[in-house]
Amino acid sequence: MQAKKNIIVLATTNPGKAREIRALLGSLPLRILTLADLDIRTSYPEKGTSFEKNALGKSLFYSRRTDFLTLAEDSGLTVKRLAGAPGIYSARFSGPRATDEKNIQKVLRLMKDVPRHERSAQFICCLVLSQRGRVIKKVTGRVRGTIAFEKKGSRGFGYDPIFYYHPFRKTFGEISPGQKNRVSHRGRAL
């Protein structure tokens, strides 16, 4: 078993987020575990009013259940024309039985008649690193883009196929994971 300082627990049950974080931290001399690896089944009830408050709550909650460094994040899509929605409700924007596809379709429906110059959006990621109930570091990463008029690409997860990133002239759903990780909100935060 590696020393505790070489282990980090990802406080997420989202496989897409875990996959991206593992890829981004892969070159570091760390053993990366998930809540499932530690058989932690207790859920943190997200009640925060911001990405930072949700990430902070998750990080402290799960860091009290292990001796390892605990990295929690909260992230999502904010669309200016939708007054910042879906925001902290990104994963469940289309309702209690939300899926990525339903969420995408809801955003596209709400943005249907919005002209190109009013489709600005950004992904935001807040990360909090804690250990034994003590915050070590908080960071935020952002990436700006626009909402596409239709889905393009099948890579990534969540809203990636409708998030158009102007420097690449493609949606996040059309670019490789490596390209995305270099410019994404999560990549910038990490």
Image: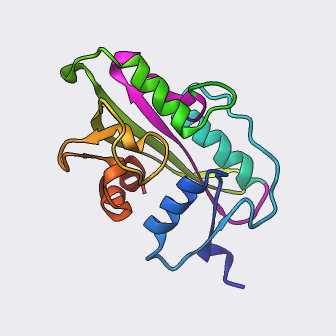
User: Position of 170 compared to 155: left or right?
Assistant: left
Q: Does 5 appear above or below 57? A: below
Asked whether the viewer can see residue 83, the reply is: no
Q: Residue furthest bottom?
A: 1
Residue 11 belongs to the span the image colors magenta: no
Magenta highlight range: 65-92
Q: Can you give x and y, in whole percent of width and height, for residue 59 in the image?
A: 64, 48
Quarter of the rendering containing residue 56: top right
Q: Residue at x 28, y 37 (%)?
A: 144
In the rendered view, how is the structure colored? rainbow
User: Position of 9 compared to 144: left or right?
Assistant: right
Residue 79 belongs to the span the image colors magenta: yes
Asked whether the viewer can see residue 74, the reply is: yes
Q: Nearer the viewer, residue 84 or 48?
A: 84
Q: Residue at x 36, y 58 (%)?
A: 181
Q: Nearer the viewer, residue 131 or 22?
A: 22
Quadrant of the drawing holding the C terminus? bottom left
Q: Does 137 appear above or below 8? A: above
User: Position of 59 compared to 176: left or right?
Assistant: right
Q: Residue at x 34, y 18 (%)?
A: 112
Q: Residue at x 36, y 38 (%)?
A: 151
Number of disc labels: 0
Q: Does 138 appear above or below 70? A: above
Q: Can you give x and y, in whole percent of width and height, for residue 13 in the image?
A: 67, 52
Quadrant of the drawing holding the N terminus? bottom right
Q: Can you give x and y, in whole percent of width and height, for residue 180 in the image?
A: 34, 56
Q: Nearer the viewer, residue 172 or 149?
A: 149
